[in-house]
Amino acid sequence: MPNGLTHLYVPGPTNIPEAVRRALNVPMQDHRAPDFPDLVLPLLADLKKVFGLGSGRVFVYPSSGTGAWEAAITNTLNRGDRVLMARFGHFSQLWADMAEQLGLDVVCVDVECGAGVPLAEYERHLSEDKTIKAVFATHNETATGVTSDIAGVRRVMDATGSDALLFVDAVSSLASIDFQQDGWGVDLAVTGSQKGLMLPAGLAMLGVSVKALEAAETSTMERSYFSFQEMIKTNDVGYFPYTPPVPLLHGLRASLDLLFAEGLPQVFSRHHRLAEGVRRGIDSLGLSLCAVAPQWYSDTVSAIRVPEGVDPAEVCRIAYHRYRTAFGAGLSTVAGTVFRIGHIGDLNEVMCLSALASAEMSLADAGAKIELGAGVAAAQNHYRAASSGGESDGAIGRLTPAAPGHRGDLR
Ligand code: PLP
C-alpha cells in the first residue's frame, strides 16, 4: 500500500481544501424546500463578486466548463454570425471548433505556440470587418501556460468602435488571476468549478453582462438545457429549473468563504508569488517555458519544455508511478515537447517546492542532464525573500512584493 499523500499538480482538478471537502459531505436535501433559496441566493450574489460583475447576472449549470462555452454561445448569438477568435493551444482550439460546429462563421487567427491573444491582429480584423458580432479570448490557455491581456482586447474593441460582444474563457484564471468583468467590459465570462474555485468538476459558471442578457432575448440559436431564460425564472426566487448538484453548491459556499477570508487580491498575489518561485526553479534547471516572453507567463500553470531527447510523457509517467506526483501532460500540438506543473488553487510555498523536487527527480530519471536541487533552491530563495516582503535577485518574471496582509495560512 502506498504511504503518504499523492501529490496533485495538474492545472485542474485542483486540491480541495479540507473545509470545502467537509462542506461537500452533506445529507441530501430537498432542492424545492422553502429554505433552499437561503443557500442559492447568497451564492449567486457572491459569485458576481468573484467575476467582478456589478450589474448583469451569473448562471450556474450542472456541467463541466465546456458546457459554459456552449451556454455562452447558444444564448446570445445567431447561426452564421461572424466571430473573431484566436487559436494558441488545446483549449482555445477546442472553443473555436465548438463555435464552428454550432454554425458560427469563425474568423480564426493562428498564433505561434507560447503567445496569446494577438491584439494587433484583432485590431486589424475589427477595423476592416464591421460585421464581427463577437470577439473571443481565452484568458489563460492551460495547455501552454499563457495568460492574455483581456483589458487590451477591450481597448482594441473600443479603439475600433466595435460593438461586438466580448466572450472570455476564464476557466483556469477566475479566482486565481486578477479578473475584472465590469472593468474590462467582458460580456460573457465562463469558468468551471475544478480550478480556482477548488471544487470537484461539475459546476459550469458564467458571468453575463446586461448587454449579453439583452442579446439573449433576441438570439435565435437553438438551446434548451442551457437556456438563460429558464434559469432566470427559477434563479430569481432561489431555485433551479432542474435538479442541482446540492453538495457542490454547499462546497461552493465554503470555497467562496475561504476566498473572501483570504481576500481576492491576496489570492492573486499568492498565485503570483508561488508561480514565480516555480518559474525561477525551472530557469535554474536550465529549462524554458513554453510561454515565449514574461508578458505571457501564467500564474496558474507552467508548461515546461523538456530537453532534446527527453520524452515529457515519460517524465509524467515516472512522476506518477515512482514519486506519486501528478503533473499535467502535454496536450495537442505540444504533446511531445512539454509537461505542466499546475500551481492553481489551494497551494502554498512548500507544496510548490515538493512539485519542483519531484519534477527534478522525474526529469533526471527520464534522462535530462540537470543538477538535482538547483530548481528547489532557486524557488526557496524566492519564497524566503518574498515572505519577508522583499524581492530576490535576477527576476525572470513579473515579481511583485508579497501582498500586505497576506496571511499565508496553512489550511
Ligand atoms: N477552457 C480552459 C482554459 C480549460 O483549461 C479547460 C479545462 O481544463 C476547459 C476550457 C474545459 O473545461 P472542462 O474540462 O471543465 O469542460
Image (cartoon, rainbow, N blue to C red):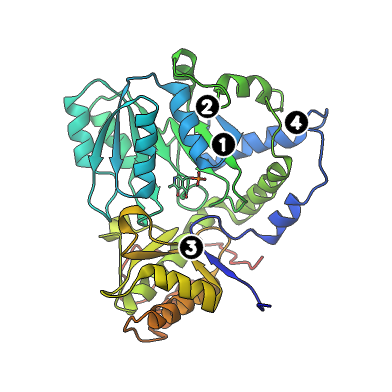
Quick check: marks 4 and 2 in contact, CB under 8 Å? no
Q: From the image, tell me which residue sits under label 3.
A: 343
Position of residue 296 in the picture relative to residue 177 (left or right): left
Closest to the camera, between mark 4 and mark 1, is: 4
Q: Position of residue 288 (x, y in %)?
A: 29, 69
Q: Secondary structure at mark 4?
A: helix
Of pointers 3 and 1, the one earlier in the residue sequence = 1
Residue 31 seen anywhere in this rendered image of the structure: yes
The image quarter in which residue 218 lies: top left
Q: Is residue 136 above or below residue 322?
A: above
Q: Secondary structure at mark 2?
A: loop
Find residue 56 and name its label: 2
Q: Residue at x 62, y 51 (%)?
A: 199
**Label 1 beta carbon less than 8 Å to ligand 1:** no
Q: Observer-nearest residue: 77 or 403?
A: 77
Tag 2: residue type? Gly
Q: Position of residue 214 (x, y in %)?
A: 47, 17
Tag 3: residue type? His
Of pointers 4 and 2, the one earlier in the residue sequence = 4
Q: Residue at x 63, y 34 (%)?
A: 44
State the separation of the CA atoms marked 1 and 2.
9 Å
Quick check: marks 3 and 2 in contact, CB under 8 Å? no
- Dot 4 alpha-carbon crowd within 10 angstroms: few under 14, some 14 to 19, many 20 or more: some
Q: Is residue 77 above or below residue 141?
A: above
Tag 4: residue type? Pro
Q: From the image, tell me which residue sits under label 4.
A: 37
Closest to the camera, between mark 4 and mark 2, is: 4
Q: From the image, tell me which residue sits under label 1.
A: 48
- Dot 2 alpha-carbon crowd within 10 angstroms: few under 14, some 14 to 19, many 20 or more: some
- Dot 3 alpha-carbon crowd within 10 angstroms: few under 14, some 14 to 19, many 20 or more: many
Of pointers 3 and 2, the one earlier in the residue sequence = 2
State the separation of the CA atoms marked 3 and 2.
31 Å
